[in-house]
Image: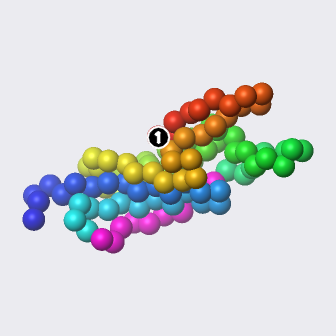
Amino acid sequence: ILKNPISSILLDIGGTYIKSAVIEFGQSHPENIQLFETPSFIPSESGHRTIPTEALLNSIEQAIEAQRLYKPQVSRIYTSGQMGGYVLEGKQGFEVIRIV
């Protein structure tokens, strides 16, 4: 057994919730599972569903900070989502922004 286990934050960034948890190396069950509401979509005449980037980043930061309060010594953050940790943003074209 490790004297200082390796902790990781898990983030699942979805259209309804940002789910977060902490998992220790070698364990199969995450701890401290929390849900944070994903910011509301911006209304669009085109039918595209878009979330304001700054609001999304703020929600992700809240989820990370909540887990760091629970387990201050984390060594990794793993993300999952439809774009694998990226956001496409723009009105004319799209700019790729890393969210983590």
Helix, strand, or loop for circle 1?
A: loop
Q: Which residue is label 1 attached to?
A: 100
Q: Is residue 15 visible?
A: yes
User: Is 65 on the left-hand or right-hand side of 39?
Assistant: left
Name the residue type under label 1: Val
Q: Is residue 78 above or below residue 2?
A: above
Front residue (pair 55, 44): 44
Residue 74 in the image: state x and y as whole percent.
29, 49
Q: Is residue 69 visible?
A: no
Q: Is residue 28 above or below residue 22?
A: below
Q: Which residues are magenta?
A: 28-38
Residue at 35 percent of width and 60 percent of height: 22
Residue at 67 percent of width and 50 percent of height: 39
User: Is 67 on the left-hand or right-hand side of 74?
Assistant: right
Residue 32 in the image: state x and y as whole percent.
39, 66
Q: Is residue 96 above or below residue 43?
A: above
Residue 32 lies in the magenta-colored region: yes
Q: Main secondary structure of the magenta part?
A: strand
Residue at 60 percent of width and 40 percent of height: 87
Residue 97 in the image: state x and y as whole percent.
56, 33
Q: Residue furthest right?
A: 45
Residue 83 in the image: state x and y as whole percent.
56, 47
Residue at 40 percent of width and 51 percent of height: 78
